[in-house]
Image (cartoon, helix red, strand yellow):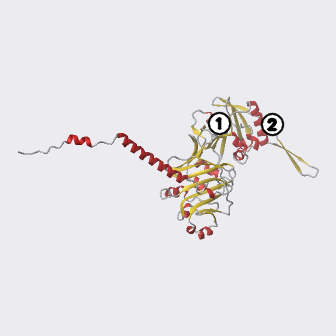
């Protein structure tokens, strides 16, 4: 008789319990949250301002880079042969062998550049730096400021408003900008597909506008009118561009947006301009104002001979001698002034806006609804702008090295959420 072993298999399967789905999902959630927290802590570590202590007293901006094995190639490609210190040929290739982790370029109010580095004192190539005429200032352990000359340190930072990236994907550093005494805004710099993005917090003073980008646009900019009240900034360059007196822009409302468009015209290195804003005067008041501006720009010269035989001259600006005509462009009535040397000045005023331009074609493009438009604050065609950025007549200070601009095509500024995004593309 054959005996069989009777094992209750069914019963044993009941003793092997499956893990609860809730437990599995809870475990997955903990892993995900842990990964996010770890990444966030890594991001905070990479964006901390450990070189900010080296800021010179007159610094108004800082560009900080985190150099690692991952970012080294990208930084070499981005900065290439760009000098890191004013009037000194020191480049990123020269400092890569001895820096530890990070370095920062400070820009002062005169456009001068100095370099802060994290490095061991014994690793500093002092002979090379002495040969290049570079001054070394020790801030504290492993933090040094390299500059053209000895610089005062002590840029107090009472308030730094940060715009942090939640993830550190493609992060290569950070950018800080001084907005007023002891106040700075700070945010991340990322690099992806040859596109550099800088994100800064928006304090609510700047809003997106619709700016037009006609053919051959050099730059299109939308800013608040109060920017023109400081002669040392935009208004100085605008007056040089138009040729009119300093008070030419007095009609602009400080509280409203002003749009500026610059395009390349047919002349060699020639620029045509257009300013548009919300009207603060009636059309008749603006015509009288423009007649006076043109008269000041083209004064009459009276000469007479004095008793001793010398020639005396007197300049007279007489608005009553300035004439204008009404012209029609795309169904809109514009006022046209002819100025000396075959120059032109076009003025248009509608119900909600007005513009002034020295170009009929640019005025037509502005009125044409089919002209390319984009939401943003600023658009610059760097390929067209380079020759003008190098022109010392308009820009006496080089805040951005031309060696860096030569590699790129477009600069744009837009508002996104609670931040301002600056983009440079090649």
**What is the number of callouts on the image?**
2
Towards the viewer: 413 or 30: 30
Image vertical order of residue 208 relative to residue 150, above or below: above
Q: Earlier in the sequence, mark 2 or mark 1?
A: 2
| Local SS, label 2 | helix
Residue 309 vertical placement versus 290 (above, below): below
Front-lying residue, 307 or 114: 114
Question: Within 10 angstroms of label 2, few (less than 14), some, or many (20 or more) residues?
Answer: some
Where is residue 140? Give x, y as percent. Answer: 61, 62
**How packed is label 1: few (under 14 Cα within 10 Å), some, or many (20 or more)?**
many
Residue 194 visible somewhere in the drawing = no
Toward the left, the furthest residue is: 1
Where the N terminus falls, by quadrant? top left
Residues under labels 2 and 1: Cα distance?
A: 24 Å
Query: Residue lying farthest right?
Result: 307
Q: Residue furthest bottom?
A: 127
Q: Position of residue 102 (x, y in %)?
A: 55, 58
Query: Mark number for residue 319?
Result: 2
Q: Which residue is mark 1?
A: 363
| Closest to the observer, 129 or 50 | 50
User: Circle 1 sits in a helix, a strand or a loop, which is it?
Assistant: helix
Please tell me in which quadrant of the rendered image residue 278 appears.
top right
Res. 58 image quadrant: bottom right
Left or right, residue 111 beside residue 308 = left
* Residue 168 in the figure: left or right of residue 224: left
């Amino acid at each position: 008789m054959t005996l069989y072993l009777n094992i209750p298999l069914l019963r044993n399967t009941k003793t092997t319990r499956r893990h609860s789905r809730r437990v599995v999902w809870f475990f997955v959630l903990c892993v995900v949250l842990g990964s996010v927290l770890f990444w966030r802590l890594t991001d905070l570590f990479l964006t901390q301002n450990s070189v900010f202590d080296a800021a010179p007293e007159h610094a108004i901006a800082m560009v900080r880079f985190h150099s690692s094995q991952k970012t080294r190639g990208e930084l070499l490609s981005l900065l290439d042969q760009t000098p890191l210190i004013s009037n000194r040929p020191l480049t990123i290739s020269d400092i890569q062998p001895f820096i530890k982790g990070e370095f920062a370029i400070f820009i002062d109010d005169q456009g001068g550049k100095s370099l802060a580095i994290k490095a061991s004192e014994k690793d500093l190539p002092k002979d090379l730096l002495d040969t290049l005429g570079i001054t070394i200032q020790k801030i504290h352990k492993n933090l040094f400021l390299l500059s053209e000359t000895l610089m005062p340190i002590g840029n107090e930072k009472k308030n730094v408003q940060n715009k942090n990236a939640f993830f550190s994907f493609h992060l290569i550093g950070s950018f800080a900008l001084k907005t007023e005494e002891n106040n700075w805004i700070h945010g991340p710099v990322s690099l992806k597909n040859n596109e550099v993005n800088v994100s800064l917090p928006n304090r609510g003073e700047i809003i997106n506008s619709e700016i037009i980008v006609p053919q051959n646009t050099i730059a299109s900019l939308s800013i608040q009118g109060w920017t023109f009240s400081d002669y040392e900034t935009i208004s100085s360059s605008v007056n040089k561009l138009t040729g009119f007196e300093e008070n030419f822009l007095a009609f602009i409302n400080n509280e409203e947006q002003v749009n500026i468009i610059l395009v390349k015209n047919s002349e060699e290195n020639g620029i045509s301009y257009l300013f548009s804003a919300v009207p603060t005067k009636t059309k008749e008041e603006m015509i009288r104002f423009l007649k006076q501006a043109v008269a000041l720009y083209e004064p009459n010269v009276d000469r007479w001979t004095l008793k001793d035989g010398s020639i005396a001259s007197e300049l007279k600006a007489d608005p009553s001698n300035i004439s204008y005509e009404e012209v029609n462009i795309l169904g809109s009535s514009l006022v046209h002034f002819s100025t000396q040397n075959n120059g032109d000045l076009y003025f248009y005023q509608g119900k909600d806006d007005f513009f002034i331009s020295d170009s009929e074609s640019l005025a037509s493009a502005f009125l044409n609804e089919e002209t390319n438009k984009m939401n943003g604050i600023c658009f610059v065609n760097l390929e067209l702008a380079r020759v003008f950025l190098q022109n010392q007549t308009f820009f006496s200070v080089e805040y951005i090295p031309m060696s860096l601009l030569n590699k790129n095509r477009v600069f744009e500024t837009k508002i996104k959420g609670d931040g301002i995004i600056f983009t440079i593309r090649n």
